[in-house]
């Protein structure tokens, strides 16, 4: 087996990333940093120079030792950073196998840490109400203001995904007490419609200056084309700036707020799961963590012994 120095192996790998795969400078630098750290640790751990031959003979315990070192070192890495390092190593060793026909089966036995999913970032009740009031910005034509308010009200008042809200058609109008939504995976669910939601959507439909076919999306752009989610995202950027809300105040945050505020008001998880169209209850259970986190903050701020 070839005894090519590990530094030369790494240099060839980086040339491949930059020249053949045309990855960005920053991405290549990240690979270089991750792989060089691994090679440096392995050289110390093995107490010998590292070559292509060495890389082929590394055992699962060698990889685990490196990952444990990164978790517990002077600057411990998070689970997501450890997962990224492991991904870089897999890419590196796949390249070695293709380039030199040198295979290491030990790495395949290593499981990465499960990165903790970030908690949904909901708005406060007052923040969500302000975003869906339609009273903050009046810089566009009345029908556009009505459109933006209708979309945001569907997100917060009915818990829709933005793609679901923008798929609404004239055939489903005027809105009544409930709406059948086809969500991810083509699964349908029945969503109750609050009077304030129906009023916002029906008002937009009356003001919309464009003729829309019954089965076409009812929400339109300024020139009459199908409304892009990006337009709503930009409108929310303006709103959160005007209202002093954080960058986390996005269209999806309104859906998060729908679930979080329902839970805080006594809603049960199974019902919220059905309303959101979650396939798994574990996905909906994240909102209990949000609610618990909010309670802890209130407790710490208010309790005299905190």
Image (cartoon, grey):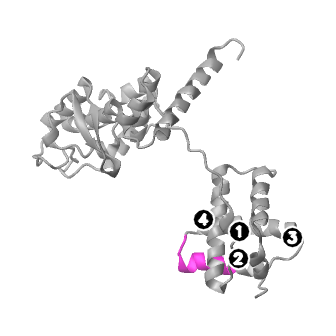
Which region shows up in magenta?
A: 10-23
Q: Main secondary structure of the magenta part?
A: helix
Q: Tell me if residue 224 comes above or below residue 244 in the rendering.
A: below
Mark sitting earlier along the chain (1/3): 1
Choose between 250 and 44: the one closer to the eye. 44
Q: Is residue 213 left or right of residue 51?
A: left
- The mark found on residue 46 in the picture is 3
Label 1 vs label 3: CA separation? 16 Å
Label 1 vs label 2: CA separation? 8 Å
Q: Residue furthest bottom?
A: 2
Q: Is residue 215 left or right of residue 196?
A: left
* Residue 75 visible in rendering: no
Mark sitting earlier along the chain (1/2): 2
Identify the residue position indicated by label 4 in the image: 26
Label 2 vs label 3: CA separation? 18 Å
- The mark found on residue 10 in the picture is 2
Residue drawn at the location 79% of the way across and 86% of the way down = 3
Identify the residue position indicated by label 1 in the image: 35
């Amino acid at each position: 087996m070839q005894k090519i120095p590990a530094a030369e192996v790494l240099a060839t790998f980086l040339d491949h990333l930059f020249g053949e795969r045309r990855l960005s400078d920053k991405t290549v630098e990240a690979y270089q940093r991750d792989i060089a750290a691994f090679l440096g640790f392995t050289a110390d751990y093995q107490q010998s120079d590292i070559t292509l031959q060495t890389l082929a003979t590394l055992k699962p315990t060698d990889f685990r030792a490196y990952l444990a070192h990164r978790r517990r070192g002077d600057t411990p890495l998070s689970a997501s950073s450890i997962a990224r390092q492991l991904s870089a190593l897999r890419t590196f060793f796949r390249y070695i196998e293709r380039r030199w026909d040198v295979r290491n089966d030990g790495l395949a036995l290593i499981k990465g840490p499960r990165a903790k999913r970030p908690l949904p970032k909901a708005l406060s009740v007052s923040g969500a109400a302000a975003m869906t009031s339609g009273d903050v910005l009046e810089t566009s034509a009345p029908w556009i203001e009505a459109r933006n308010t209708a979309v945001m009200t569907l997100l917060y008042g009915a818990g829709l995904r933005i793609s679901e809200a923008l798929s609404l058609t004239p055939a489903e109008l005027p809105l009544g007490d409930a709406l059948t939504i086809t969500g991810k995976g083509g699964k349908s669910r029945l969503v109750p419609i609050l009077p304030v939601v129906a009023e916002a959507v029906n008002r937009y439909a009356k003001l919309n200056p464009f003729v829309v076919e019954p089965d076409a999306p009812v929400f339109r752009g300024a020139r009459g084309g199908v409304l892009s989610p990006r337009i709503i995202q930009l409108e929310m950027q303006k709103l959160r700036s005007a209202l002093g809300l954080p960058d986390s105040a996005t269209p999806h945050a309104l859906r998060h707020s729908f679930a979080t505020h329902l839970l805080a008001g006594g809603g049960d998880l199974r019902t919220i799961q059905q309303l959101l169209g979650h396939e798994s209850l574990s996905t909906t259970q994240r909102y209990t963590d949000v609610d618990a986190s909010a309670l802890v903050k209130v407790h710490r701020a208010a309790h005299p012994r905190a």
